[in-house]
Amino acid sequence: MPPQRRYWDSDCFLAYLGEDTGKRGKCLGVLDAAEKGDVLIITSALTIAEVVYLKGNPKITPEKSDKICRFFENKYIQPINLDRYLAEEARQLLWIHPALKPKDAIHVASAIRAKVHLMDTFDKYLIGLSGKIGDNPLIIGEPNIPYEEDMFKGLEEN
């Protein structure tokens, strides 16, 4: 069975890499499923540039930056390149939804271009657009795959 395709905007990556345990916990189920091959996370290449600092914290150091770059190289993360045509699709979304921020429009346009049906974010405005964007309406919400920690993980066999 092919993996479920989900779009993640930068909010999800920042939540996972940050210290907000509530948001981070919601991301763990998706990442666990992705590591098992059950989910493919699609994101814009723009996300890599957006994950420079965690809100309320100083910019990420070059040492941590290398670690984050390696994280984005995981086989279960597929970046969508931003080109002129995708930027024009994002601009169209801005005219239809004037309160949409340009970077968010790029994320939505990327999800639509990738033919992804589910978009994960913590952005309340974007969540309010769930089911209202795209020919096959994009379902937008917080990451919602429960994380089930292996209770036997770390135990040595006797």
Image: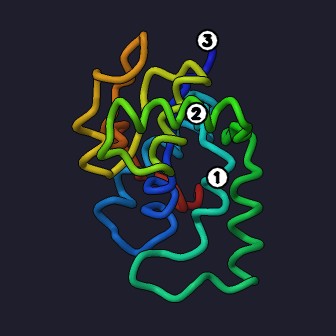
Q: How many marks?
A: 3
Quadrant of the rendered structure where residue 93 is? top left
Secondary element under disc 3, as helix, strand or loop, is loop
Colouring convention used in this rendered image of the protein: rainbow
Q: Amino acid at mark 2?
A: Ser
Local crowd at mark 3 within 10 Å, few (<14), some, or many (≥20)? few
Q: Are marks 1 and 3 in contact (CB under 8 Å)?
A: no
Q: Earlier in the sequence, mark 2 or mark 3?
A: 3
Quadrant of the rendered structure where residue 147 is? top left
Local crowd at mark 1 within 10 Å, few (<14), some, or many (≥20)? some
Residue 22's place in the image compared with 116, above or below, is below
The residue where tag 2 is placed is: 110
Quadrant of the rendered structure where residue 132 is? top left
Please provide percent x and percent y for residue 50. Answer: 58, 63
Q: Are marks 1 and 2 in contact (CB under 8 Å)?
A: yes
Please provide percent x and percent y for residue 111. Answer: 53, 30
Q: Residue at left 77%, top 72%?
A: 66
Q: Amino acid at mark 3?
A: Met
Q: Earlier in the sequence, mark 1 or mark 2?
A: 1
Q: Amino acid at mark 1?
A: Leu
> Could you tell whether 86 is left or right of 149 in the image?
right
Q: Nearer the viewer, residue 135 or 28?
A: 135
Q: Are marks 2 and 3 in contact (CB under 8 Å)?
A: no
Quarter of the image that includes the N terminus: top right
Secondary element under disc 1, as helix, strand or loop, is helix
Q: CA distance from mark 1 to mark 2?
A: 10 Å
Q: CA distance from mark 2 to mark 3?
A: 24 Å
Please provide percent x and percent y for residue 125. Answer: 26, 46
Please provide percent x and percent y for residue 17. Answer: 51, 67
The residue where tag 3 is placed is: 1
The residue where tag 1 is placed is: 46
The extreme front residue here reads 95
